[in-house]
Image (spheres, rainbow, N blue to C red):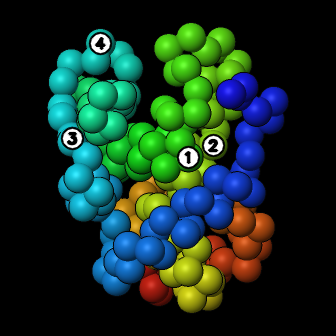
Amino acid sequence: MNVPKKPRYEHAKLVGRTFINSLNIKSYPIDPIKIVYLMNWRFEIDNLYGEEGYTFYNTKNKSYCIVIDNAQGIKKQRCKFTIAHEIGHIIMNHYTSYDIGSLTESEYRILDLEADVVAGEILMPYISIRKNLNRSILYLANKFDVSYSAMETRLKFLNVYNLCNENNLATTTK
Ligand SMILES: [Zn+2]
């Protein structure tokens, strides 16, 4: 199968949203490591020499192992995003649909953009954002334990950025 010419943003949104809704998680922030274990995938920390994370797919027993670079340990939010991004690759079937090892740089970039969208759906679920649109961006960033800029990007992507009350500092906890 060929990698799509453009990232399938709407498809990625739907895949991520369906997945997180199916897990029926009621408390925030979402812990992507818990999801990895819930799905019976493996998780490891190793020295990836600059690479943030990757997923090892075992074609024989069809199992996944997400590996995160050990230098990321101190940056918790970044680490969580990397894991959620790797989950994105898995549930978008990137490993089973494409020959990941032989992709061009631009093909890989397309799949990465799709995985980023799924990561956003996992860490900042739409269902919860929708209920909290009267809150400030900082409040939401704290609720989902993501960086302010990640929260901003997500709200812009969902076209609800202008609905969020940026100046509502009374609701922030930090
Ligand atoms: Zn990736």
Q: Label 2: which residue?
A: 114
Q: CA distance from mark 1 to mark 4?
A: 26 Å
Expressed as whole percent of the image width and height from the top left, the position of residue 162 reads 76, 73
Judge the density around disc 4: few (<14), some (14-19), many (≥20) Cα neighbours within 10 Å. few
In this rendering, would 27 be left or right of 9? left
Q: Label 3: which residue?
A: 43
Kind of residue sitting beneath label 2: Glu
Mark in front: 3 vs 1:
1
Q: CA distance from mark 2 to mark 3?
A: 21 Å
Please say if the residues under marks 4 and 3 sit with CB atoms less than 8 Å apart: no
Residue at image point 29% right, 57% down: 39
Dot placed on the residue nearer the N-terminal end, 2 or 3: 3
Dot placed on the residue nearer the N-terminal end, 2 or 4: 4
Expressed as whole percent of the image width and height from the top left, the position of residue 132 reads 55, 85
Considering only vertical position in the picture, is 5 above or below 165? above
Residue at image point 53% right, 42% down: 93
Dot placed on the residue nearer the N-terminal end, 1 or 2: 1
Kind of residue sitting beneath label 3: Phe
Considering only vertical position in the picture, is 109 above or below 162? above
Judge the density around disc 1: few (<14), some (14-19), many (≥20) Cα neighbours within 10 Å. some
Judge the density around disc 2: few (<14), some (14-19), many (≥20) Cα neighbours within 10 Å. many
Q: Nearer the viewer, residue 88 or 41?
A: 41
Q: Which mark is residue 49?
A: 4
Q: Secondary structure at mark 3?
A: strand
Q: CA distance from mark 3 to mark 1?
A: 18 Å
Q: Label 1: which residue?
A: 92
Kind of residue sitting beneath label 1: Met
